[in-house]
Image (spheres, coloured by chain):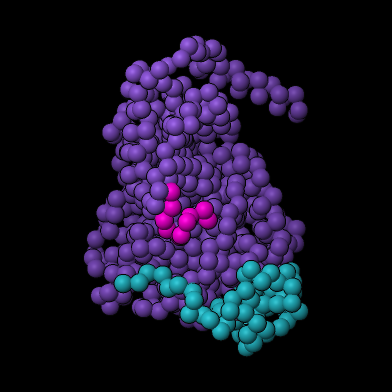
Chain colours: A cyan, B purple
């Protein structure tokens, strides 16, 4: 299941960071969402990466990234 | 194996320790094919159920990472910790505690330098086209972590405002989230040395370079994880506590690193930049929130040939995190308390990095244990971490929870419970009223002394001491012998 839609914030446009190979064939791909920085491997169980079934408790609101606090402020 | 103390002192690397563990039946190699998720996590969690005896596990057949090796659970059981300290398997937690407490201030550091060209950690070097995913067999540690974490990194840095001062070099364990091929975020708080250095570098607009050491001398993670004085070197401290030499070399970016580590990642802080980090399943057994954290750019990677990536399972306990840091969380509190109060006889702060601690003390006078508890809250670790304190008499072993429960059952009056509201708290404590601020609880479960009314109870005194300890060991051995 290779998709470029982020399972966490549902943004599209994920980039490929690495592909794992076994005997020359690609067996999985690591993707990263440039909007919320979620990284995942497309071979992971659906409940961790598929926006349709992933727990909403761990969703990130791509429209409200200001809400997340910045650590270490002067 | 009569030579365990010498063998422990001769360890100079993760490889040496894995060999010792293997010889003792405390390390296994997992060569069946395993998917990074959820396979690695499942195996690590299953192993860590056995806090006393779990072996380290070396994976050498992770799907998609041919030829790469991953070690988990290196510090994942009391038996592994015992072997690191030169004691046999089966040594009790209480004995291990006194082994560490007895080393406090006892030994001189033995630090030597190896030229970079001869240091094993620099056998292979990458300075361009770096992709951390191509070097490290990473996996999602907990299901809802925000990415792939390096959970057992010892991060070395120099004070950005005093870069030539050896003592002000800092080595600490911080969690790192990989953010693309050659970047990572680092989570810290202003109270930690790294947080302080990041703030100083950004305030003065000076570079902050770090070296992330992976797969290290197993003593470093045990002894460098607890705050010591800012101007004390963690390397010197770890060497003294191990009673063994430590070999250092220079990283490519000029920082003192362990010469025999498996991998070192050299990186530079991106001044003023913050990136979304988290969540991460943390040691209280709950996920941290999503925050904007400082980001570092990787400038080079060195590693040994055929390196072993060492990582940790951390989450809801018991986990390797508890056995890794538990004793060395307890021992400094004990040593610091005894400077003021030699009546303190033991400290058990094994639980969630000391969120709960149990202290045994000889009551000098009525109510004295409460005074000791308040002193514990002002030790360096106590300031942020010691949330619940249970005070017991010296005739109660704080490492034996059955005895602690006996003291709570028979020696606690409800008005001996003190709540200190609105105190500082470690931000990831899920019970805090607001992150970073919470209440402290002291339960005085010690017995009464005049002028308190003491009642009429007279204690039963079952036999205790070395003879009984030896007998219980013998019973256990006879029982194990009957199995084999
Ligand atoms: Zn996203």
**Image spot of residue B73 (x, y percent):** 59, 50
Instruction: Name the quarter where the N terminus of chain A is drawn.
Output: bottom right
Q: Residue at x 31, y 53 (%)?
A: B233
Relative to residue B211, is residue B55 depicted above or below? above
**Image spot of residue B482 (x, y percent):** 75, 24
Number of callouts: 0
The foreground one among B311 and A72 is A72
Instruction: Name the quarter where the C terminus of chain A is drawn.
Output: bottom left
Residues in magenta, as a range = B430-439
Look at the image and tell me whether residue B52 can be seen.
Answer: yes
Residue B161 included in the magenta stretch of the image: no
**Residue that sits furthest to the bottom in the current view:** A13
Tell me the quarter of the picture where residue B403 sits: top right
Prevailing secondary structure of the magenta residues: loop
Q: Residue at x 65, y 53 (%)?
A: B44
The foreground one among B282 and B35 is B282
**Image spot of residue B136 (x, y percent):** 57, 68
Tell me the quarter of the picture where residue B89 sits: top right
Q: Residue at x 72, y 76 (%)?
A: A50
The foreground one among B47 and A10 is A10
Q: Residue at x 69, y 21 (%)?
A: B478
Tell me the quarter of the picture where residue B197 sits: bottom left
- Using residue B163 as the reference point, say whether residue A63 is left or right of it: right
Relative to residue B146, is residue B16 depicted above or below? above
Look at the image and tell me whether residue B238 can be seen.
Answer: no
Residue B434 included in the magenta stretch of the image: yes
């Amino acid at each position: 299941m290779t998709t470029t839609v982020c399972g966490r914030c549902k943004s599209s446009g994920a980039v490929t960071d690495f592909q794992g190979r076994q005997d020359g064939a690609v067996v999985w791909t690591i993707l990263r969402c440039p909007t919320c920085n979620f990284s995942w491997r497309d071979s992971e169980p659906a409940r961790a990466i598929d926006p349709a079934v992933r727990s909403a408790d761990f969703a990130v609101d791509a429209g409200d990234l200001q809400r997340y606090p910045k650590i270490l402020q002067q | 194996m009569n030579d365990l103390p010498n063998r422990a002192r001769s360890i100079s690397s993760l490889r040496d320790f894995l060999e010792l563990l293997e010889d003792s039946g405390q390390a296994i190699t997992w060569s069946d094919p395993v998917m990074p998720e959820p396979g690695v996590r499942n195996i690590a969690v299953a192993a860590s159920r056995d806090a006393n005896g779990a072996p380290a596990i070396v994976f050498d057949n992770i799907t998609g990472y041919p030829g790469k090796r991953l070690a988990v659970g290196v510090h994942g059981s009391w038996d592994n910790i015992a072997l690191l300290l030169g004691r046999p398997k089966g040594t009790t937690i209480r004995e291990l505690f006194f082994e560490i407490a007895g080393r406090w201030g006892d030994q001189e550091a033995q630090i030597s330098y190896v030229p970079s060209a001869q240091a094993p950690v620099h056998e292979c070097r990458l300075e361009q086209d770096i992709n951390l995913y191509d070097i490290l067999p990473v996996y999602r540690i907990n299901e809802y972590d925000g990415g792939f974490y390096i959970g057992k990194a010892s991060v070395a840095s120099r004070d950005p405002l005093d870069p030539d001062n050896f003592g002000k070099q800092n080595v600490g364990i911080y969690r790192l989230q990989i953010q693309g091929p050659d970047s990572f975020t680092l989570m810290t708080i202003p109270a930690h040395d790294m947080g302080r250095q990041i703030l100083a570098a950004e305030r003065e607009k000076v570079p902050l370079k770090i070296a992330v050491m992976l797969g290290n001398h197993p003593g470093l993670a045990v002894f460098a994880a607890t705050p010591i004085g800012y101007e004390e070197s963690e390397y010197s401290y770890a060497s003294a506590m191990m009673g063994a030499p430590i070999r250092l070399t220079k990283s490519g970016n000029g920082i003192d690193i362990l010469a025999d580590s498996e991998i070192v990642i050299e990186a530079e802080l991106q001044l003023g930049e913050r990136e979304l980090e988290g969540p991460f399943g943390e040691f209280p057994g709950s996920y941290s929130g999503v925050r904007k954290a400082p980001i570092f750019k990787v400038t080079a990677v060195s590693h040994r040939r055929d390196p072993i990536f060492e990582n940790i399972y951390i989450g809801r306990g018991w986990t390797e995190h508890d056995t890794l840091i538990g004793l060395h969380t307890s021992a400094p509190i004990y040593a610091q308390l005894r400077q003021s109060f030699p009546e303190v006889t033991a400290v058990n702060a094994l639980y969630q990095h000391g969120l709960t601690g149990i202290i045994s003390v000889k009551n000098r006078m009525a109510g004295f244990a409460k005074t000791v508890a308040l002193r514990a809250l002002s030790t360096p670790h106590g300031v942020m971490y010691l949330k619940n304190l249970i005070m017991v008499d010296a005739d109660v072993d704080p490492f034996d929870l059955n005895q602690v429960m006996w003291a709570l059952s028979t020696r606690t009056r409800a008005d001996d419970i003190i709540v200190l509201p609105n105190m500082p708290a470690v931000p990831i404590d899920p019970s805090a009223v607001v992150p970073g601020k919470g209440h402290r609880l002291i339960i005085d479960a010690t017995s009464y002394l005049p002028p308190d009314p003491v009642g009429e109870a007279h204690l039963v005194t079952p036999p205790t001491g070395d003879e009984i300890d030896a007998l219980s060991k013998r019973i256990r051995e006879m029982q194990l012998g009957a199995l084999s």
